[in-house]
């Protein structure tokens, strides 16, 4: 990761801007409804090892004074799905069984909620993103 | 799969706040299938070079690229650790979920 940041620094112009956009190390919520109507039905279990490594890499290039931190913003990002099948597919892509715990309990909870909600339901997975802006020094 | 990312547009609003994109040369690292690339293009950069190590994703990104953006957006298979550009090429580099 540090090597990638060094490469970004190399190809940026003096006073160039590096934008680091990635999920915040916080557990995502899954539920029904969209936008202000979202109702969380469960919190996902996630491993944040990669986030710690990324933070460490950024801290490294800040210590090297290649960049200075200019701006940081955290905001929610929603993924909206039209069916339980879509949620299942997204969940299957979410992480390998070795890396992420099973979320079958969450799928079953959503399944029951969908049965109660009837047609027209939508599933949302909500999780915060961090946007960090670094400027070349 | 039917999945809509960020229907409220919070992500692109945050990126718009982050810096001035107009007329800039932009490098996007980790572009995947180009979802964010097309949103970045709406902020007015002169050029976007978008990279991802996954050739299948780049193929999809190229297939989804609107004809009127082909002069401004270029997709490449590449690793973040080995960028094939001269020093000082870009105004903005975006690590798009890449760290």
Image: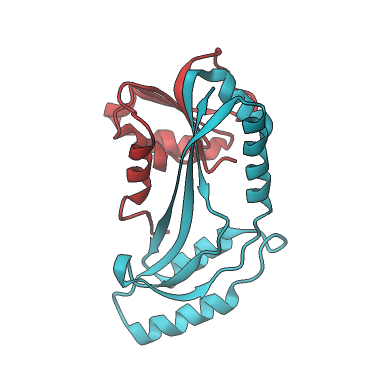
Residue found at x 72% / y 61%: A98
Colour for chain B in the figure: red
Is A71 in front, or is A52? A71
**Does residue A114 appear to the left or right of B83 in the view shown?**
left
**Does residue B40 appear to the left or right of A24 in the view shown?**
left
Instruction: Please state the horizontal and vertical placement of residue A78, each as a whole percent of the image.
Output: 40, 59
Q: Which quadrant, please, contains the C terminus of chain A?
A: top right
Q: In the rendered image of this protein, does residue A111 appear above or below residue A23?
A: below
Instruction: Please state the horizontal and vertical placement of residue A4, each as a whole percent of the image.
Output: 63, 30
Report the residue that reaches farthest toward the left: B68
- Is any part of residue A63 visible from this angle? yes
Q: Quadrant of residue A45?
A: bottom right
Colour for chain A in the figure: cyan
Residue found at x 38% / y 47%: B11
Q: Which quadrant, please, contains the N terminus of chain A?
A: top right
Q: In the rendered image of this protein, does residue A92 appear above or below residue A14?
A: below
Q: In the rendered image of this protein, does residue A17 appear above or below residue A104?
A: above
Residue found at x 37% / y 44%: B14
- Is any part of residue B39 visible from this angle? no
Residue found at x 41% / y 59%: A79
């Amino acid at each position: 990761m540090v090597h990638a940041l060094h490469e970004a620094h190399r190809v940026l112009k003096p006073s160039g801007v590096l934008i680091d956009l990635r999920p915040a190390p916080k557990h995502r919520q899954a539920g029904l409804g969209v936008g202000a109507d979202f109702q969380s039905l469960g919190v996902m279990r996630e491993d944040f090892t990669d986030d710690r490594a990324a933070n460490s890499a950024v801290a490294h290039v800040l210590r090297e004074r290649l960049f200075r931190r200019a701006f940081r913003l955290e905001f929610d990002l929603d993924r909206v799905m039209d069916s339980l099948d879509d949620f299942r597919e997204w969940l299957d892509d979410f992480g390998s069984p070795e890396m992420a715990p099973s979320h079958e309990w969450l799928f079953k909870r959503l399944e029951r909620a969908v049965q109660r909600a009837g047609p027209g339901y939508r599933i949302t997975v909500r999780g915060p993103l961090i946007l960090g802006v670094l400027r070349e020094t | 799969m039917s999945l809509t990312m960020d229907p409220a547009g919070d992500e692109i609003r945050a990126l718009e706040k982050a810096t001035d994109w107009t007329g800039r040369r932009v490098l996007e690292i980790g572009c995947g299938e180009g979802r964010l690339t097309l949103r970045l293009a709406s902020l007015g950069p002169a050029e976007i070079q978008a990279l991802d190590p996954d050739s299948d994703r780049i193929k999809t990104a190229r297939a989804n690229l609107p004809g009127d953006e082909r002069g401004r957006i270029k997709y490449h298979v590449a690793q973040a650790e080995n960028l094939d550009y001269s020093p000082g090429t870009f105004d903005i580099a975006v690590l798009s979920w890449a760290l």
